[in-house]
Amino acid sequence: MKDKRNLHQKVQELCDCFATTDPLMEMAKVSEEPDKEEAALKWVALAVLHGVTAGAEKIKVFRHADGSVAVSAKYREAPLRTPGAEVGGQVIEILKRVVGLEGEKGSSPLALGIRDSSLELKVKYKKEDSKETVTIKFPG
C-alpha cells in the first residue's frame, strides 16, 4: 500500500501548481494523461480549486457498476465534466487512500494548504449496492 501522506502532499503540490489556472479547462484535459494515477491526483487538486473559486458546497464523484463515472457539484446543481471511467475510478481510490477510508462507508477531514491559506474539506465515501460515491464537502 502506498503511503497516503505522499498522495496528500502531491495533491497539495498540484493545488499550488494550478492555483492560477482555470480549473475547469484543466479538468477537461486529465482524461488524456497517460499516467492515470497522476491524472486522478491532478483532477482532485483541480476539483478542490474549482470548488473554492466557484463557491461550491460539495462535489460528488459517482462510479456505477458498469465502471462509468459521473460528477456533480452543488452550488447550483450542475454536472461537471467527468474525468472518464479510468481516471474517475482512480479519483475515488485516491481520495479514499489520502484520507484513509476503508469499508463500505466513512468520512474524514482533509486539510490542504493552498498558497498562503489553509482549507479543511470533508471527504465522505459510501458504497451502496453497486454504486460508489465520494463527496468532497467545502466549508460553509
Image: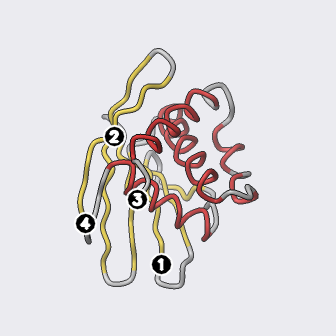
Q: Are marks 1 and 2 in contact (CB under 8 Å)?
A: no
Tell whether 111 sits left or right of 31. Answer: left
Structural distance between the alpha carbons of marks 1 and 2: 25 Å
Q: Amino acid at mark 1?
A: His
The image shows residue 47 at horizontal and vertical percentages of: 53, 45
- Quadrant of the rendered structure where residue 20 is? top right
The numbered mark, 3 or 1, whose residue comes first in the sequence reads 3
Quick one: label 2, few (<14), some, or many (20+) residues within 10 Å?
Answer: some
Q: Quadrant for the N terminus, please.
A: bottom left
Measuring 36% from the left and 39% from the top, which residue is drawn there?
138
Pinpoint residue 76: horizontal percent, then vertical percent.
47, 49
Nearer the observer, disc 3 or disc 1? 3
Report the front residue among 123 and 138: 123
Labels 3 and 4 touching (C-beta < 8 A): no
Q: Report how far apart the C-alphas of labels 3 and 4 lie in the structure.
A: 20 Å
Q: Which residue does the image show at 60% across and 45% down from the upper left?
A: 42
Q: Circle 1 sits on which residue?
A: 64
Q: In the rendered image of this protein, does residue 108 appear above or below residue 32?
A: above
Secondary structure found at label 2:
strand
State which tag comes first along the sequence, 3 or 4. Answer: 3
Q: Return the disc, 1 or 2, that comes first in the chain's sequence.
A: 1
Q: The C terminus lies in which quarter of the figure?
A: top left
Mark seen at residue 105: 4
